[in-house]
Amino acid sequence: MNTKKLNEAIEVLKSDLGPALISCDIYPTGVGTPLVGYNSNPKAAALFDQVTSYIVKALDGSGFPVLHDYYLLELKNDNLVVVLLVGDYQWDMLIDEKKVNLGLLLNIALPNAKKALEEAIKA
């Protein structure tokens, strides 16, 4: 894995979200140990890795469609958690909802982040 390219992916996200991005980590699915991060929170990465696994199993067991690109959690105090899934990697993000438009997040920032992470994985 090219750490430089992963850090470049984080810079893309920081550029798109500006001060709305509080923290983020990129880690392999099933491992949950961050390879890179911004205001990194390794405990959150490990826990969200487990949450993702649980959601995948719950969806499978319920007969719902499978999890696709991301999931979002709305937290108190205007915070959002977004977990982006790309191949065998996850990217958790803590975002200040007051500082970003949801349309910008979903239609610009996340697609740009996904593309940057895909490029980093290929490198």
Image (cartoon, helix red, strand yellow):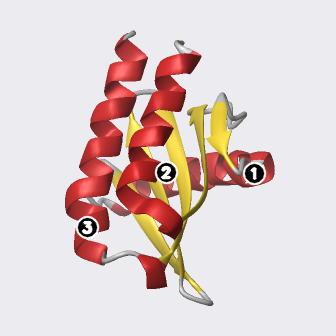
- At 41% from the left edge and 61% from the top edge, which residue is drawn? 17
Q: Secondary structure at mark 2?
A: helix
Return the residue found at the far right: 43
Of discs 1 and 3, which sits in the foreground?
A: 3
Amino acid identity at mark 2? Lys
Name the residue beneath numbered marker 3: 104
Q: Position of residue 50 (x, y in %)?
A: 65, 49
Q: Residue at x 73, y 45 (%)?
A: 46
* Residue 66 in view of the camera: no
For marks 2 and 1, the one nearer the N-term is 1
The residues bearing labels 2 and 1 have C-alpha atoms spaced at a distance of 25 Å
* Residues at marks 2 and 3, CA–CA distance in whole angstroms: 30 Å
Dot 1: few (<14), some (14–19), or many (≥20) neighbours within 10 Å?
A: some
Where 26 falls versus 98 (above or below)?
A: above
Q: Residue at x 27, y 44 (%)?
A: 112
| Quarter of the image with the N terminus in it | top right
| Marks 2 and 1 close (CB-CB < 8 Å) | no
Residue drawn at x 33%, y 26% as measured from the top left: 118
Give SS at disc 3: helix
Categorize mark 3 by other alpha carbons within 10 Å: few (<14), some (14-19), many (20+). Answer: few
The residue singled out by tag 2 in the image is 57
Mark 1–mark 3 contact, CB under 8 Å? Answer: no
Q: Is residue 52 left or right of residue 115?
A: right
Residue 98, how many percent across, how many down? 46, 85
User: Which residue is denoted by mark 1 in the rendering?
Assistant: 41
- Write down the quadrant of residue 32 in the picture: top right
Categorize mark 2 by other alpha carbons within 10 Å: few (<14), some (14-19), many (20+).
few
Q: Is 39 situated above or below 18?
A: above
Residues 87 and 122: in front is 122
Which sits in the foreground, 55 or 80? 80
* Quadrant where the C terminus is found in the figure: top left
